Image (cartoon, helix red, strand yellow):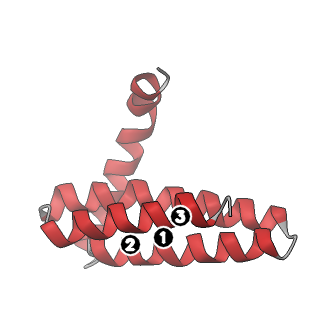
């Protein structure tokens, strides 16, 4: 319900940063893998009773999740990129609550 309204606020800055990252040589897959690293760090921080660090890593993961799509729209979407994105998201959504 809120997604459509929030997208109008979130998408323009993500697209701007995505274009800059793409021009700097970053790929969507690289950003996806960095985001997955943040997901693992978030799960570890939460498991070790460091919720503020966990929150920081969750927010960084979500930022990477938005940026990888923005970079993919600039560079062109790939099957591997879509696969990595969904698989790593499932790990994030399962690992952090666990």
For marks 3 and 2, the one nearer the N-term is 2
Give the residue drawn at x 46%, y 77%.
Answer: 34
Instruction: For mark 2, give the secondary structure.
Output: helix
The residue located at (67%, 58%) in the rendering is: 97
Foreground label between 1 and 3: 3
Residue 7 drawn above or below residue 74: above
- Foreground residue, 39 or 97? 97
Contact between marks 1 and 3 (CB within 8 A): the answer is no
Label disc, if present, on residue 23 of the rendered structure: none
Which residue is under mark 1? 35
**Distance between the alpha carbons at the discs numbered 2 and 1:** 6 Å
Q: Residues within 10 Å of mark 2 (few under 14, many from 20)?
A: many
Give the image location of residue 60, x and y in percent: 58, 63
In the image, residue 55 lies at what x, y percent? 73, 59
Residue occupying the point 42% across, 68% down: 88
Q: Which residue is mark 3?
A: 92
Q: Report the residue at 26% width, 62% height from top.
A: 71
Q: CA distance from mark 3 to mark 2?
A: 15 Å
Q: For label 1, count other residues whose C-alpha is less than 10 Å away and answer few (under 14), some (14-19) or many (20+).
A: many
Circle nearer the N terminus (1, 3) = 1
Element type where label 1 sits in the image: helix
Query: Quick check: 95 left or right of 56?
Result: left
Query: Circle 2 sits on which residue?
Result: 31
Disc 3 vs disc 2: which is toward the camera?
3
Seen in the picture, residue 24 relative to 96 is either above or below; the reply is below
CB under 8 Å between discs 2 and 1: yes
Question: Which image quadrant is residue 56 in?
Answer: bottom right
Q: Quadrant of the C terminus?
A: bottom right
């Amino acid at each position: 319900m809120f997604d459509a309204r929030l997208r109008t606020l979130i998408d323009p800055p993500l697209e701007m940063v995505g274009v800059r990252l793409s021009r700097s040589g970053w790929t969507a897959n690289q950003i996806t893998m960095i985001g997955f690293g943040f997901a693992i760090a978030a799960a570890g921080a939460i498991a070790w009773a460091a919720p503020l660090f966990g929150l920081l890593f969750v927010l960084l993961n979500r930022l990477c999740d938005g940026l990888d799509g923005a970079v993919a729209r600039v560079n062109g979407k790939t099957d591997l990129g879509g696969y990595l994105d969904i698989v790593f998201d499932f790990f994030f959504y399962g690992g952090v609550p666990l």
